[in-house]
Image (spheres, helix red, strand yellow):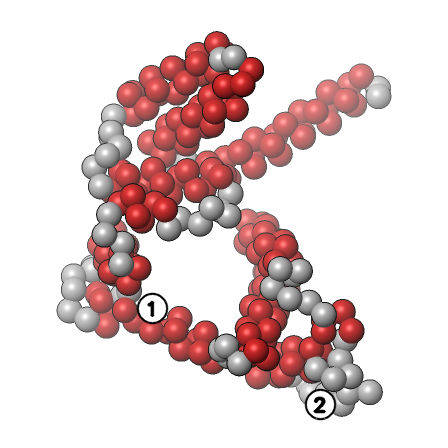
Amino acid sequence: MVVFAQKERYGFEDFRRLVAVLRGPGGCPWDAVQDHHSIRRNLLEEAYELAQALDREDLENMKEELGDVLLQVLFHARLEEERGSFTIDEVCDAAVKKLIFRHPHVFGDMAGATPEEALRNWDAKKRVEKQQRSVAQAMADVAETLPALWRADKLLNKAEQAGFEPEDAEKARETLQAETARLCAAEAEDREDALGNLLLAAVRVGRRAGADPERALHRACERYIVRFREAEAGTGA
């Protein structure tokens, strides 16, 4: 049996040590055989469960889900610590240095009195840090693993900042209508591409309206469930 100190209250270092104990000799057989790929889905699921707690402003659940996300972070860091690659302290070191670098309006002499200026400074420093020499390169660096609607929103935002996206909301709506017509007229083998173009156009319209596309579709799904439940109840099914 592994001995782990019983305390009234635990802190970050206790959490860190517990993960090492679970992975170590005499620890948990399941934890011991995991790797980055086997628990990848866990990290994503915990992040989405935290997002739900945030949306619901459920503080008690938020605290729990933050712990679950932190467990995933500590677990992945522990895997690399065992290999001698890096430690959680090095993760923290890199994160702190990045935050200092990307906040020149706080730790340097750049102007950044408004949220908009601060965000521009962040983006400019990020491009320097990532050695992004073009907008296309910055787009390519947007993670493919993002939900597709959020990825589309980020790509359009980068294009807009570079002056490649029209600000005219009416033109965006016309493009949406045109893509809808193309999807309706598309041959079977072209329908998926046509649907993709339509969804991208819809995100563009949503951006002009200041709407988050991912949240908008989730809310639409919830409304659909309510309507379906009401319809199902009405039929006596």
- Looking at the rendering, which quadrant does residue 203 occupy? top left
- How far across and down, in percent of the image, does residue 139 sit? 34, 45
Residue at x 34%, y 37% (from the top left corner)? 156
Which residue corresponds to the image point at 54% horizontal and 18% vertical from the top-left?
189
Determine whether, in the image, residue 96 is placed left or right of residue 111.
right
User: Residue 166: horizontal and vertical position, in percent?
Assistant: 24, 29
In screen coordinates, is 237 left or right of 148? Answer: right
- In the image, 181: left or right of 123? right
Q: Looking at the image, which is closer to me, 90 or 48? A: 90
Determine if residue 58 is in view: no
Q: Does the image show residue 230?
A: yes
| Residue 44 location, quadrant | bottom right
Identify which residue, 80 or 210, lies in the foreground.
80
- Report the disc number at residue 5: 2
Determine which residue is flagged by label 1.
99
When the figure is inspected, residue 151 is found, relative to residue 177, above or below; the finding is: below
In the image, what residue type sits under mark 2?
Ala
The disc placed on residue 213 is none
Q: 182 above or below 61?
A: above
Amino acid type of the residue tagged 1 in the rendering: Leu
Residue found farthest to the top: 185
What's the residue at 27%, 54% (across, down)?
132
Q: Residue at x 28, y 63 (%)?
A: 129
Q: Return the disc, 2 or 1, that comes first in the chain's sequence.
A: 2
